[in-house]
Image (cartoon, rainbow, N blue to C red):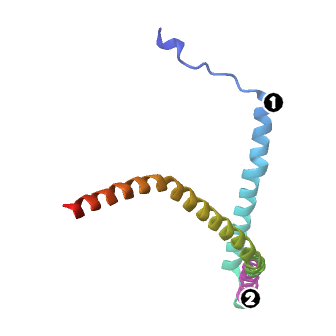
Amino acid sequence: MTSEEFTPTLQQRNPITYQAHRRQAFWQIYFPLIVFTILVIATIVLAIAATSEQVSKWADISLIFIISITMVAFLVVTVGLVISIVYSRRLLRATPYFFFNAQRFIYLVEIRVKSVSNAAVEPILKINGFFAGAGALRRKQN
């Protein structure tokens, strides 16, 4: 076997799907990136060219955005905590019943295992007890 047999053949790309992929990549990746870059550059230019009154105005607007984002994050965390508290309460109400049933089942298993193990050991204990009694009688007679 030669190495030519194992080399993969390069397939030609489908031009229709490749062009569709290129269009989607532009509109979904590159276009939003370009728009965001333009907005950032415009904001930097406005910040550099602003007067002191405009700087104060932009600072207030920025503070409003920062506070609103923090409030949304706080709201999401608060809703998550409330949901976890409600479901924890429901879980704590339901668990005693299920744990009681589980404990009862384990207790029944314990009783059955003890009775089976006692039944399995009983013949051996009787034989050992008989030999121990016979040995004690022999020692007493000597």
Position of the C terminus by quadrant: bottom left
Residue 119 is tagged as: none
Q: Is residue 7 above or below residue 95?
A: above
Question: Which of the marked residues, 1 or 2, is nearer the chain's N terminus?
Answer: 1
Magenta segment includes 129: no
Relative image position of residue 132 (x, y in whole percent): 32, 59
* Viewer-nearest residue: 25 or 131: 131
Q: Which residue is mark 1?
A: 16
Q: Nearer the viewer, mark 1 or mark 2?
A: 1
> What secondary structure is marked by label 1?
helix
Relative image position of residue 51 (x, y in whole percent): 71, 87
Left or right relative to 59: residue 3: left
Relative image position of residue 3 (x, y in whole percent): 47, 14
Q: In the image, what residue type sits under mark 2? A: Asp
Rendered residue at 58%/20% (across/down): 8
Magenta segment includes 69: yes
Q: Which residue is mark 2?
A: 60
- Residues tagged 1 and 2 counted as in contact (Cβ below 8 A): no
Gap in angstroms between the C-alphas marked 1 and 2: 51 Å
Task: Name the quadrant containing residue 114.
Answer: bottom right
* Viewer-nearest residue: 31 or 88: 88
Find the magenta span and give its range.
Answer: 54-77
**Magenta residues, dominant SS class:** helix
Q: Is residue 79 above or below residue 60?
A: above
Rendered residue at 76%/27% (across/down): 14
Task: Name the quadrant containing residue 98.
Answer: bottom right
